[in-house]
């Protein structure tokens, strides 16, 4: 399942119940962090990096090892996002 979230990113939920959030709009931990929230939507501007999070099938956020022990990534590159998506799909 795919969902657009707040015009700033998206969620992907895999058949195994894991959901990955990829956010790259104003206020997210990405290149657009300091952009005014009302000034631009993520899709219009784009970003070289994104903020990511993962929920297990039970709905609990995961402290992923690639996030430095936290539940949210900081400025993930496209390659890191792909790696996270592949990881979540294989759980």
Image (spheres, rainbow, N blue to C red):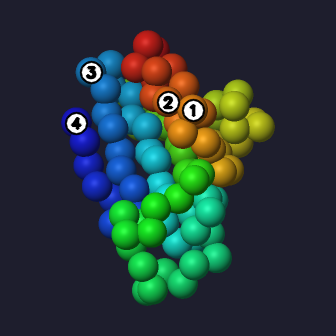
Q: Check if mark 1's residue and mark 2's residue have beta carbons within 8 Å.
A: yes
Q: Check if mark 3's residue and mark 1's residue have beta carbons within 8 Å.
A: no
Q: Is residue 45 left or right of residue 67?
A: left
The residue tagged 3 is 15
Residue for point 61% across, 59% down:
30
Quadrant of the image occupied by residue 38: bottom left
Is residue 61 among the parts visible in the rendering?
no
Q: Position of residue 44 (x, y in %)?
A: 37, 69
Residue for point 70% across, 28% down:
65
Residue for point 44% across, 45% down:
21
Q: Check if mark 2's residue and mark 4's residue have beta carbons within 8 Å.
A: no
Earlier-in-chain disc, 4 versus 3:
4
In this view, 69 is above or below 75:
above
The residue tagged 2 is 82
The nearer-to-camera label among 3 and 1 is: 1
Secondary element type, mark 4: loop
Residue for point 64% across, 76% down:
34
In this view, 31 is above or below 10:
below
């Amino acid at each position: 399942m795919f969902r657009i979230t707040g015009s700033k990113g998206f969620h992907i939920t895999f058949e195994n119940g894991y959901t990955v959030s990829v956010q790259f709009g104003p206020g997210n931990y990405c290149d657009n962090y300091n952009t005014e929230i009302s000034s631009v939507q993520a899709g219009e501007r784009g970003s070289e990096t994104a903020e990511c999070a993962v929920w297990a099938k039970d709905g609990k956020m995961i402290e992923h090892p690639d996030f430095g022990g936290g539940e949210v990534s900081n400025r993930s590159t496209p390659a890191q996002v792909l790696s996270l998506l592949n990881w979540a799909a294989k759980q």
